Image (cartoon, rainbow, N blue to C red):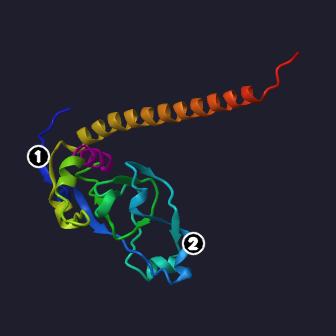
Amino acid sequence: MTGHWQQRSVEELCARVTSGGTPSRSRADYYGGGIPWVKTGELLDRLIVDSEETLTDLGLAESAAKLLPVGTVLMAMYGATVGALGRLGREATCNQASCAMIVDPTVADERWLYYVLLNDRPRIVARATGAAQQNLSASTIKRFSYPTPPLREQQAIAEVLGALDDKIAANTALAATAEALSIEVAASAATRTPLG
């Protein structure tokens, strides 16, 4: 792998940096459709394929919510979740407390951007302002800049980190299954009546 690394801002790496919106809660016909609507509490530093709430086509059309493409990197901008990340595994919308970063595929790999931001979270959170509630603005996020390798190197780095993430997720799931099984076995043994 060869190539020159350049300092690039999030804004330079993205085709668009935006935020979402929340349709009026007084309109039941805006909610419960087939469009995922991601809130910042669902940004758990992983791929997002589902959401607690969904919007209807009408809710999307009559609000500031925007349909975001697969691969959009989301970052929480306010409160206790500030700096939390997620990456869309399907088309979805988000609320206004999320910064949505849609990479320019000619200059950036969305997985690489996600991992760079994840690695830089302490500095990002330190830039949040506000006494009662910590806040980041989209303009602040756009200005974060990173030494950026050529696209092919970004993709190679993201592949390695993604494989490690997949392995960690698989091991975590295996450990949870083993723990649940051992609890079940222990409970079963405790309820058995001894013979004789």
User: In the current view of this chain or complex, which residue is farthest to the right?
Assistant: 196
Query: How far from the left and from the top, in percent, is residue 115?
Result: 29, 44
Q: Which residue is mark 2?
A: 32
Q: Residue at x 26, y 65 (%)?
A: 133
Frontmost residue, 130 versus 103: 130
Residue type, mark 2 in image: Gly
Q: Point out the image quarter for the C terminus.
A: top right
Where on the picture, by quarter, is residue 183? top right
For marks 2 and 1, the one nearer the N-term is 1
Residue 112 in magenta stretch: yes
Query: How far from the left and from the top, in percent, is residue 77?
Result: 28, 63
Any part of residue 75 in sight: no
Q: Is residue 77 left or right of residue 130?
A: right
Q: Give the magenta part as a residue range.
A: 110-120
Q: How many marks?
A: 2
Secondary structure of residue under mark 1: strand
